[in-house]
Image: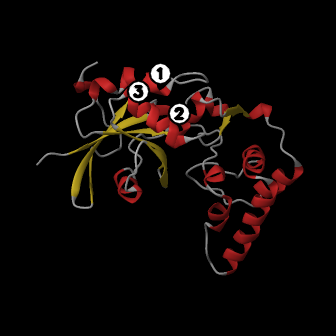
Amino acid sequence: MTEEKLTVNEGKEEYIDANGVTYGRYAVRTPVVIKGDDPAEIARRYVLPHLRPGDAVFFSEKMIACTQGRAIPVTDIKPRGLAVWLSSKVYKNPGGIGLAMPETMEMALRECGTARILFAAACHCVGRLFGKRGWFYTVAGRKAASIDGPCHYTIPPYNRYVVLGPAKPNTVAKRISAALNGALVLIVDINDLGGEILGSSEKVDKALYKKILKDNPLGQCGQSTPCGIIRQKLT
């Protein structure tokens, strides 16, 4: 593998300015990961040959979750009545299903607990009275916000799966960093509407990296680029 194979996904810009510094963002293609794959070994094989000193590496939370077995076939999820009812009240976001289907809402109830989801729903209703959005996920937390449902653009077989957020993202990031000779590693939940830094191998300025990645340089899952490299542009 040679450095020339580093790519920028179609429709994405190579460079972005953040806090007065210009950064390049490069997507790294890998095979489709499955349960039991080792993300550190994937990083060693597909990312390490590209790295330069000072680079940061970012991984899709969906990729990490799939290696952990946190992807569940939709057909294996049997939603309870409460999940069906709650999902019917969720705003249908054009950027993804979120909890707007019974199966994803069912997994939110299991991950976060029924009491917390009901309280989050109540807070959502209060927020709507004041013209505010987002209170549901603020209360329900990242476990709920990180749940992804099946979408047409998701690479098979995960276009028929519900994927939960990754477990212990900081720990995973540190283990991957060790495989990359100490490079900074981020586990991110980024889509075309924004996102979060879920884990990192060391303490970072999360607001900075959210700016650097705000336009989702990895693209959607169908592009098979679940990780990427951030590189400061030299002037």
| Residue labelled with disc 3 | 43
Q: Who's the residue at 76% across and 59% down the image? A: 117
Image spot of residue 6 (x, y percent) = 28, 30
Helix, strand or loop at mark 1: loop
Q: Is residue 116 left or right of residue 183?
A: right
Judged by depth in the image, the label closer to the viewer, 1 or 3, is 3
Q: Is residue 49 left or right of residue 102?
A: left
- The kind of residue tagged 1 is Pro
Q: Is residue 193 left or right of residue 158?
A: left
Helix, strand or loop at mark 3: helix
Q: Rate crowding at label 2 as few (under 14), some (14 to 19) or many (20 or more) other CA atoms within 10 Å.
A: many
- Residue that extends furthest to the right in the rendered view of this protein: 81
Image spot of residue 7 (x, y percent) = 30, 32
Label drawn at residue 31: 1
- The kind of residue tagged 3 is Ala
Q: Is residue 30 visible?
A: no
